[in-house]
Amino acid sequence: MTDQDQPPAPEPVSNKALWLSPVDWVTDTGLLLRLLTRLPAPAAGPVVFGGRLARALRTIPLVGAIVGAIGGLAYVVALWLGLAPAIAAILAVLATLVATGAYHEDGFADTCDGLGGSFDREKKLAIMQDSRHGTFGVAAVVTTLLLRIAALATIADPMLVVTALIATHAAARAFLPAAMLWGNPAKSDGQGFAAGKPERASAWAALALAVIVALIALGFVALPALAAGAVAAFAMFAIARRQVGGYTGDVLGAIEQVAEIAMLLCLAALL
């Protein structure tokens, strides 16, 4: 996630609305698709920050699975056209960037600029809020792109690449509701604060859904990859809490990125 000016106080989230009809799950998925991607979504009207958005985070692995499937489709089509696995891997990563508008990559760049740009907490937050990217941010994004491309090219097999992308994109995003539940916003504005705090059941639902998607996609080889993603996500979460006092929308984007990369590298080593 990235930080922009948003309505200040998040609404409370209600338990009674958590487990509703499948139509409600589709609506929540559509809400997150509108916020986190450039894809058309079955949700009408603007994204309203607060209680509904916090509850909708239960479906965030589904959004990740859709993005991963788009990347996998690009990879398969590239191979079908006779392109080499390395080129297909580049196109697969590019497809995910187009689908999301590089949403999490932007947050990761801002986070790296902020954490590396000053020793002062307030200056770190100010740098992160600046939409311009500095040396740390550019270097970080280039590195993440190269690592993802190299991991996919190493896996190579089209079916494994498709399932790896679906699993990693779903699971990496599932760590975000948990970070929001067990952490605190670093400031009282921006998307991280305005999104609200998900309930425990919603955060656990996202994690459980991610595990199910990963196991269906990859089988038990998904377990070490999930563990690698969890370690990377927690490390990013702990660094941000220590340096800026909690999470922001940018930090959440950074958590997704490091978790996704850790999982892909683990799968590249195993597969």
Image (spheres, helix red, strand yellow):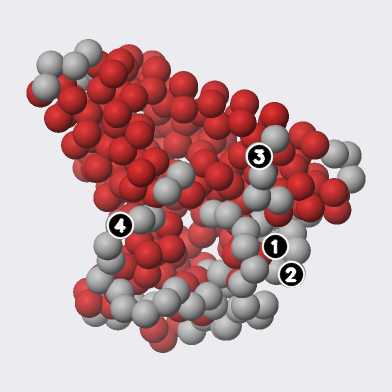
How far across and how far down the image is residue 247, in percent? Answer: 67, 55
The three-letter code of the residue at mark 4 reads Leu
For the point 43% across and 31% down, the residue is 263
Between disc 4 and disc 1, the foreground one is 4
Q: Nearer the viewer, residue 15 or 168?
A: 168
Which residue is denoted by mark 2 in the rendering? Answer: 188
> Which element type, helix, strand or loop, lies under badge 2?
loop
Question: CB under 8 Å between callouts 2 and 1?
Answer: yes
Whether residue 255 is visible here, answered yes or no, is no
Q: State which quadrant residue 202 falls in.
A: bottom left
Which residue is denoted by mark 3 in the rendering? Answer: 133
> Which element type, helix, strand or loop, lies under badge 1?
loop
Between disc 2 and disc 3, the foreground one is 3
Which residue is denoted by mark 4 in the rendering? Answer: 39
Seen in the picture, residue 218 relative to 48 is either above or below; the reply is above
> Which element type, helix, strand or loop, lies under badge 4?
loop
Which residue is denoted by mark 1 in the rendering? Answer: 185
Between disc 1 and disc 3, the foreground one is 3
Between disc 2 and disc 1, the foreground one is 2
Q: Earlier in the sequence, mark 4 or mark 3?
A: 4
The three-letter code of the residue at mark 2 reads Ser
Q: Earlier in the sequence, mark 2 or mark 3?
A: 3
> In 3D space, how far apart are the residues under numbered discs 2 and 4 (Cα atoms)?
29 Å
Q: Nearer the viewer, residue 211 or 136?
A: 136
Callout count: 4
Q: State which quadrant residue 246 falls in.
A: bottom right
> In 3D space, how far apart are the residues under numbered discs 2 and 3 (Cα atoms)?
23 Å
The three-letter code of the residue at mark 1 reads Pro
How far across and how far down the image is residue 228, in percent? Answer: 49, 31
